[in-house]
Image: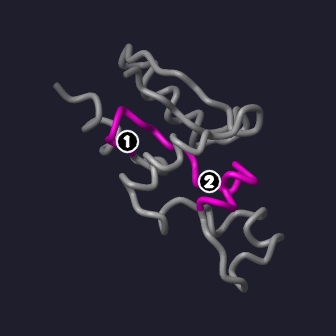
Amino acid sequence: MALQIFGTKKCNDTKKAERFFKERGVKYQLIDLAEKGISPGELRAVSQAVGREALMDTRGPRFVRRGLAYIEHDPEEEILKDPLLLKTPVVRDGARVVIGADPKAWEALIAP
């Protein structure tokens, strides 16, 4: 499976991830959450790898605007409704997943 980066073209951390892999000659597929979103199966795989609590950007304006800190909610359901709630970038290589800007963890994904 090819490396996937879930994020948005406007996200600085997603741009960092793209630059990181480009500089190392690693092929990847960018999935722009603003255009395409994330499929239920992909979200389930990410959730299983990192845990449901790590999925949402709880500091982001969308999370705050929707008042999700004050109501009980299912992170996966909310992200499927609004993919821009997902913390980005999500770098996925099969079952291995890294959420957020973490070059050391990205390096581990591509280490031989």
The magenta region covers 76-97
Q: Position of residue 76 (x, y in %)?
A: 59, 59
Q: Position of residue 23 (x, y in %)?
A: 42, 19
Tell me which amino acid carries mark 2: Leu
Is residue 94 placed above or below 66 in the rendered structure? above
Asked which secondary structure carries label 2, the reply is: loop
CB atoms of marks 1 and 2 within 8 Å: no
Question: Which of 42 and 53 lies nearest the eye of the viewer?
Answer: 42
Question: Which of 64 and 103 lies nearest the eye of the viewer?
Answer: 64
Is residue 88 placed above or below 85 in the rendered structure? above
- Tell me what residue is drawn at x 60 percent, y 65 percent: 75
Marks 1/2: CA–CA distance: 19 Å
Tag 2 residue = 86
18 horizontally vs 12: left or right: left
Residue closest to the far bottom? 70
Q: Nearer the viewer, mark 1 or mark 2?
A: 2
- Tell me what residue is drawn at x 72 percent, y 86 percent: 70
Residue closest to the far front? 41
Tag 1 residue = 103
Tell me which amino acid carries mark 1: Pro
Asked which secondary structure carries label 1, the reply is: helix
56 horizontally vs 112: left or right: right
Task: Please rate how many residues cluster around mark 1, counting C-alpha atoms within 10 Å: few if below 14, some from 14 to 19, many from 20.
Answer: some
Q: Position of residue 58 (x, y in %)?
A: 63, 69
Q: Position of residue 85 (x, y in %)?
A: 68, 57
Task: Please rate how many residues cluster around mark 2, counting C-alpha atoms within 10 Å: few if below 14, some from 14 to 19, many from 20.
Answer: many
